[in-house]
Image: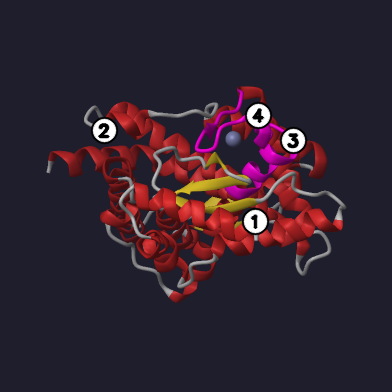
Amino acid sequence: MAQESLRAQYEALLRAEGRTVRRALAEGEARAYGAASLYERISSDFRRTLAEADIALPEPVLVAKYPHESFNAQARAVRGGTLILVNAGFSLLVLEMSKAFAASLGFFSRDEDGGITVEAATPAVRERRRIAERGMARSVLAYLFQGDAAHGGRQPLDADSAAMARLLTEATERFVVAHEFAHLLEGHLATPAQRGAGEWLHRTREQEFQADETGMLLLLRALEDGPEEQLASYLAVAGPLFFFAIDHLITRVRNEIDDIPQGMRLSDHPGSDERGAALRALLTDIHGPLVLHMADACVQWLSWHEDGIVTAARGQLAG
Ligand SMILES: [Zn+2]
């Protein structure tokens, strides 16, 4: 009953933005996954984990997409609960970045200590890299100018890299939802009695770091005793660090290219570099540095490409 009421209020909010529910749900998620229920699946996973630990969410929550401009999710008070609204342009941008990463995996090899060796850059490798950079630049520009990476076109996805691209995208989305659940669990959002319906709920900088930490612990807890727990935890750790690296890239493109619409310059969360460093310290404390292997591969890969993406973005704007 509470969920139905939240959904009705969510749909009313979308209509007020001139969007129908069908269209909003079709955006990003349906194209990326062939299903409109990814966030419901993630939420019910977390609810189950919390129930097993005898922790109750303090109030009814609905997680859904909404066309706001922050790369992070936003929480909005409504009658009888909270909407956790993930930026509608977010999923596809992350998916496109994940596809480029997955397609580049052939560029790495692993040594015996688990370190990463980059393959020599043959002309074919350099060409694949340029194609990936141009694709990522288009996605980032479409995201920044039009609020939706879909306008930047889709990179090809082959059978070898499809699974990794989807897993990494989903790991990133799980972190974003876990972070918002953590705000609720930590009592960062005013209680329903203290706030007006229709209010966007704001958090302090300290609360953001705390939500990253609690959200990460919730994610890892949800994996405990699952099949292939270790591999799953590498991926769960890669999700947030890849998210921060993408946010770092978006921030850089936004700062270095002058014509970005003003609304897209907003950020209400602390810088991604700081958040990533704090999360790294936490994870190394709990699990040792090994758990960061896949995360490091993603983050290093994106930082190698960053200059190329910025150059390609400038070229695309000029052309
Ligand atoms: Zn937050």
Residue 223 in sight in this render: no
Please report the residue visible at 70 percent of the width from the left and 61 percent of the height from the top: 45
Q: Secondary structure at mark 4?
A: helix
Q: Is residue 263 left or right of residue 166?
A: left
Give the labeled residue for mark 3: 186
Tag 1 and tag 3, C-beta contact below 8 Å: no
Give the spatial CA distance, label 1 vs label 2: 40 Å
Amino acid identity at mark 1 = Ala
Which label sits in the foreground, 1 or 2?
1
Residue 231 on image: x %, y %: 71, 61
Residue 186 on image: x %, y %: 74, 35
Q: Viewer-proximal residue, 314 or 176?
A: 176
Q: Is residue 89 magenta?
A: no
Give the labeled residue for mark 4: 194
Give the spatial CA distance, label 2 vs label 3: 35 Å
| Quadrant the N terminus occupies | bottom right
Mark earlier in primary sequence (1, 4): 1
Please report the residue visible at 65 percent of the width from the left and 56 percent of the height from the top: 2
Q: Is mark 3 within 8 Å of ligand 1?
A: no
Amino acid identity at mark 4 = Gln
Q: Is mark 1 within 8 Å of ligand 1?
A: no
Query: Magenta region: which residues?
Result: 176-204
Mark earlier in primary sequence (2, 4): 4
Q: Is residue 178 magenta?
A: yes
Give the labeled residue for mark 1: 2
Give the labeled residue for mark 2: 260
Amino acid identity at mark 2 = Ile
Which label sits in the foreground, 2 or 4?
4
